[in-house]
Image (cartoon, coloured by chain):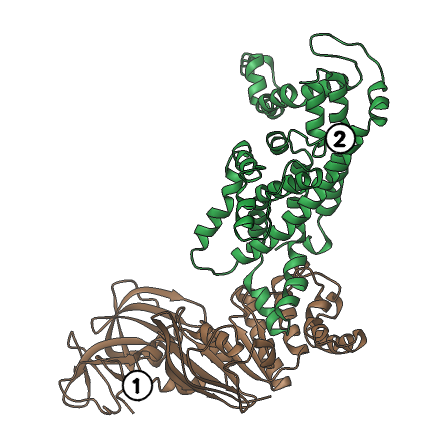
Amino acid sequence: MASVTIDSVRKSYGAHEVLHGIDIAIDEGEFVVLVGPSGCGKSTLLRMLAGLEHISSGRILIGDRVVNDLPPKDRDIAMVFQNYALYPHLTVAENMGFSLKLAGEKRAAIAEKVRPAAEILGLAHLLDRYPRMLSGGQRQRVAMGRAIVRNPQVFLFDEPLSNLDAKLRVSMRAEIKNLHQRLKTTTVYVTHDQIEAMTMADKIVVMHDGIVEQIGAPLELYDHPANLFVAGFIGSPAMTFVPGALDGDGWFRAEDGTRLPLADTGRARAGQKLIYGIRPEAMALGGDIPLTVGVTEPTGAETHVVGTLGGADITGVFRDRVTARPGETLGIRIDGAAAHLFDAEGGARLSG
Amino acid sequence: MTSPDTLTPAAPRPSRWRRLVESRGGLGLLFMLPAAVFLLCFLTYPLGLGVWLGFTDTRIGRTGSFIGLENYQWLADDPVFWLSVFNTMLYTTVASVLKFGLGLWLALLLNRNLRFKNFFRAIILLPWVVPTVLSALAFWWIYDSQFSIISWVLMSLGIIDAPINFLGDPWNARWSVIAANVWRGIPFVAISLLAGLQTIPQSLNEAAAIDGATAWQRFTKVTLPLLTPIIAVVMTFSVLFTFTDFQLIYVLTRGGPVNATHLMATLSFQRAIPGGQLGEGAAIAVAMIPFLLAAILFSFFGLQRRKWQQGND
């Protein structure tokens, strides 16, 4: 186990800079998820951590060792790839023991280390199979097994679940989390799926266009997004945004005149162009804020209503069964304490 | 229960042609016919004729009669025939090994992220694209006993003081034709192996690097094993091409000096057409078949799907 420090790291390909100075501190044993839309640089950052990409400037430390110029094999890390990268010509056992074999360990010693790892992952009966004979979930486990066997300082995961079907993804998610709780190895996990980030992380790093937008615990990001990007990225369905301005008496006035409640106006100034953000699940039926229904999507437990509010397209999630037809207007209420206020220019958070 | 008058009148029986076209087997047969005719005319017939001629004493302009294995008995005592067998084996073995080594090396180089990668890949194909006779003529000039550019360069550098007799000395001639064949054969091997290399995901190499493999270990423990199926195909073809080579030798040396570069293919032609002994020439050609079969069997077993290749992706 080791801490990881990423210190103003930059990456450019020729004149094109893709990472513009990243600072992340990861504690020993922490499970950190790098999340962001594709092209945000999260995978590049992970590959730099692994030593597969050169670091253009800045420093990366594993423990208290600067690893900038160390080759991957000397960094004491293990990585699980998106396509699993299992060696097709080796059996499951050989795949898992490959690094030990390269390190010159005896056959018996390798078997001794492979077996418990295989048992943790439920692979013990598959040790003689070749990767092609396995299902996607089993291959995923072998890839994890290969990482565990090495007992590295840091685990790196590069979108490991994105090739699995939805159901398997949910169960593997729990399995990876379980594994982390059991082994307590520092883990850096890259995904574009905010649900994965929310459910697995001790700490989430939201990245966008080569910069870190916000770092924090999952619920911290959910409750106090630092800017419009994080607010829109974390949470599903996404936060609803209504443009407008302050209305003098501490309320928010949407562009079409609809008044929305605010618990505190924070640093917002009168006349400033603002964005009012509200989570879909913070709306409730029975109030006087008009929501014009476009589509209702009943999921059983709750109903998603897609429509317009205050001139903006919004999504609301209601615990009730909504029977309104398209075109009708629902009266809803919003708790002002759950509302977020952002600067329309730059997107910074203004409410407390 | 049904009485005849409630039945709809039977449709007229379709014509024979219609039935043929509409039946699955009939249509298949029809589609197969052109290819079958082509193969029969241009493959089976000449091959059969060649084998038959080998058992006769046919000469040009005279139909021969069946003489059984006499041609082969005669060849068994013919030192020139055995020399051509030796030459063919030497030519095939040395050229194939060199083509494989150099081809694999080139493929590995081209598989990297080089600048002008596509340009180099196109250049590599040139020797393969140029008609053999043309490149053979160029080599003939390069190997000229007086005006050879190689001799000229070496003489200018003061390394030798007389031109090298490339094609006049038996062993010089053997190495010279092998070099020309290697030059011509490398593109096929290199480009095919490059295609094979590109099917190996980059992440396997990266995973191996993280697992602690050195560059050499990544090559021997990951790249090479994954490349073996393709190597088996490519080298089988390469061996077959080399074993049956004719054009290069015919243009460069015509089998000389003193039969030192005669391959079985050139000797067969030499005896059959200029020499007029069709039967004997055919027998030499037929004698190549066991060697070729051995090469094909080798590839058949080499190509069998290995255990790790079975299953889904």
Q: Is residue A321 visible?
A: no
- Amino acid on which the number 2 mark rests in the picture: Ile
The residue lying toward the viewer, choosing from A280 and A284, is A280
> Is A66 left, or right, of B208 in this rendering?
left
The residue lying toward the viewer, choosing from A175 and A167, is A175
* Place of residue B28 in the rendered image (x, y in percent of width and height, measured from the top left): 60, 25
Image-quadrant location for residue B198: bottom right
Query: Crowdedness of circle 1 by 10 Å Cα count: few (<14), some, many (20+)?
Result: some
* Place of residue B89 in the rendered image (x, y in percent of width and height, measured from the top left): 74, 39
**Residue lying at 45% horizontally and 73% vertically, measured from the top left:** A44
- Whole-angstrom CA distance, mark 2 to mark 1, is 89 Å
**Residue lying at 58% horizontally and 46% vertically, measured from the top left:** B186
- Amino acid on which the number 1 mark rests in the picture: Asp
Image-quadrant location for residue A321: bottom left
Farthest front residue in view:
B161
* Place of residue B72 in the rendered image (x, y in percent of width and height, measured from the top left): 83, 23
What colour do you see for chain B?
A: green
Q: Relative to B28, does residue A143 appear above or below in the rendering?
A: below
**Residue lying at 39% horizontally and 78% vertically, measured from the top left:** A207
What colour do you see for chain A?
A: brown
Query: Crowdedness of circle 2 by 10 Å Cα count: few (<14), some, many (20+)?
Result: few
What number is the disc on residue A335?
1
2 vs 1, front mark: 2
User: Where does label 2 land, which residue?
Assistant: B289
Label 2 sits on a secondary structure element that is: helix
Q: Relative to A50, does residue A220 appear above or below in the rendering?
A: below
Query: Where does the C terminus of chain B fall, quadrant-wise?
Result: bottom right
